Image (spheres, grey):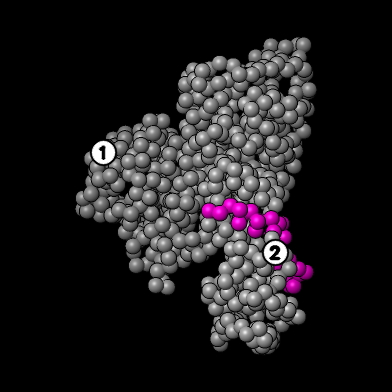
Amino acid sequence: MGYANAAVAAQGSLKASLFGEFRLEAADGEPILLSNRRASLLLAILFLEPDHAIDRESLARLLWPDRFLPQAKASLRQCLLDLKRKLAEHRIDNLMVSRAEVALAPGSLACDLFDLEAALSSGDPQAAIEFLLEIGNRPLLQGPSLNAEFDEWITTRRDHVDARLRAALSQAIQNTSKTGRERLLEAARARFPSYRTFNRVADQTTIAVLPFGQFDSVGGQLFLAEGIVDELTDRLAGIQGIAVAGRTSVIATVDKSRTLTEIATDLGVSHLIEGEVRRDEHGVEVRIALISGQTGTQVWSDRLTGSVEDFFESRKVISANIIAAICRALGLAASPAPSRRMTSDREAYALFLQARAMSQRIGVEGAFEKAIEFLKQALEIDPEFAECWTALANAHIMTAAITPSLERVEESAEAARCAQRAIALDPGQGHAFSILGIDEWTRFNPARALEMAFEAYARDPNDADVCSRLGSCLLYLGKAREALPYVEEAVDRDPAYPRNYAMLTSAYLGIGEVEKALKAGQRMADMGAPTVWLALAHLVAGDHEAAMKSHFDTRVYLGSTLMRPPGMPPMDDAARDAYFAFAARGIYSGNEADRVAYCQMLDGLHATMPDPYDSTIVFPAIFMGHSDLVMKIYSERIHPANMFGLMNLWIDIDPINRTIRHPDFMAFAERIGLIEAWDRFGWPDLIPADPRTA
């Protein structure tokens, strides 16, 4: 399908092809030939900023950076005159030029990028498929290098556009029927060869890989059972039509000594994989079985024998043969999964597995520190172990997020460095992209954070953490409706991870679904997690007594699941109970005097605590609508422990909504980068358009 004949092309006086070499034509299809490359690029820049005027000085510096500014401005002036004359030959007069700015007239433009985005949002997969196949993998504004400044600008712009397209594709695929979904997914791969998606459909097979038992009569360290579980989990997650339960939920559920059918019910899966590894002086025997989650009966099983070396060196054989057999038993085609860049060193792999086991011990003092130690040892042995670099990045980001660290921004920066190393070794490391997204928040760059989150999801949608972090990023930006499918997906993937229910509660509160929020908050409480979000749901429901009780109940978690503020000494029980009772009244009683008193205490804590930006200060400040303190904290520092509170800014009840209704809120949003993100990805649910232009 040629662009000139596109069925859904917008009407206008100028049409452009932005993918591949820039081409321009009039509304009647007559080509407009521009001999001056900078004139073509100038128009292309304006097409990529269709609703904005661009100041002339910026254009001059971008297109003629090697000239003195007065010379560059003169070159721009001549270029604009030439463009005006050329467009006039085709009876086009939509280039708007003032002394300070340049723009193209709104509503007068059409291009392949606009058409593709319109098709993806229209609910018509056939149009989107045709556009995707037509555009293929051609880069935006393909052509030789112009200069370093423009090359950097177009590289960034290409990243922005591809992130936008991946986000639109994800939404379109979720909203398309099963038949159209497969065809749209295949077309998506014409542009993004590694594009994968998790299709939340009723007939999807859901599997949990349980920890394998290990029986060893030889002695010494043997991590073969963990290695086989690791390989099965990752390989199955790469198969279209299979959803794999997250490791965090599997471990939490199995530790509770459930029967197989109870485990399947708790995890919400249709099948389980269990097994065991036995080693004696003759070698190793591995048993693997596929179990029906509904009946607990065996659907398929196999036994493998060999030496430790055979199994370690034959992970590919295990993944090829065993995965194929499991898929046949389930009636699925074993589509090839992206290859993993693992290590060939047994010791490095064993250290990696030990570290990941430590990282899953959330709330255990020193667990992340030990995990980081193991991972660094593994990377000393094999510095090209990409998945280990991602695990190290995650250990640093979790240290910053959920331990009492005074170096949270520094930990985040180190996590980003490790994530970049992982991606350089293996661009398929989707989880590493999500970690880069978290670090971008600490740099006051939420637009880039969301790009990274979408990039992570496009590369590895089957990772529960990737789903969770994309959902949370959208929640931070006030886009609860867009976030909800990803949050629900994270819950589906990792149903025994309390953090996901905190996000789900916030998402439901953000869209006004209070009863659903209460259920999600109660589910979190039932798992033995702090009841902060249940208290918040009670507040929104108007039940102040229940809200105060739920908040007071969280006191028992202080120092374990609910970390103490870094640098602060432990409280005795009496002081702890008095503080939580005071906080519960201040946040949830509905009494303005109680609220003001607790706001004053938070001001004092902010002035005296070692980490004045700690979540124990900013979270209640958000809940009470203490706008000045909220905006002060987030204007000065965003780190992985306090950014989680941003999702609760967007609950539209008093006093929480006092912050977004504050007269200085838009200036605050500009300072921390929210407005840039909204301009690029859409405005939040409660602010559907830029109020400054109204």
Q: Which residue is mark 1?
A: 546
Q: Which residue is mark 2?
A: 2
Considering depth in this image, is 61 or 365 the residue closer to the camera?
Answer: 61
Rendered position, 690 above or below 532: below
Q: Position of residue 487 (x, y in %)?
A: 48, 43
Q: CA distance from mark 2 to mark 1?
A: 62 Å
Residue extent of the magenta highlight: 123-148
Q: SS for tag 1?
A: helix
Image quadrant in which you'd find residue 178: top right
Image quadrant in which you'd find residue 538: top left
Residue displayed at 61% across by 18% down: 299
Disc 2 crowd, CA 10 A, few/some/many (<14, 14-19, 20+): few
Q: SS for tag 2?
A: loop
Asked if the magenta segment contains residue 132, the reply would be yes
Rendered position, 206 above or below 118: above
Considering depth in this image, is 636 or 627 the residue closer to the camera?
Answer: 627
Q: Position of residue 686 (x, y in %)?
A: 38, 58
Identify which amino acid the numbered label 2 is placed on. Answer: Gly
Residue displayed at 67% across by 32% down: 333
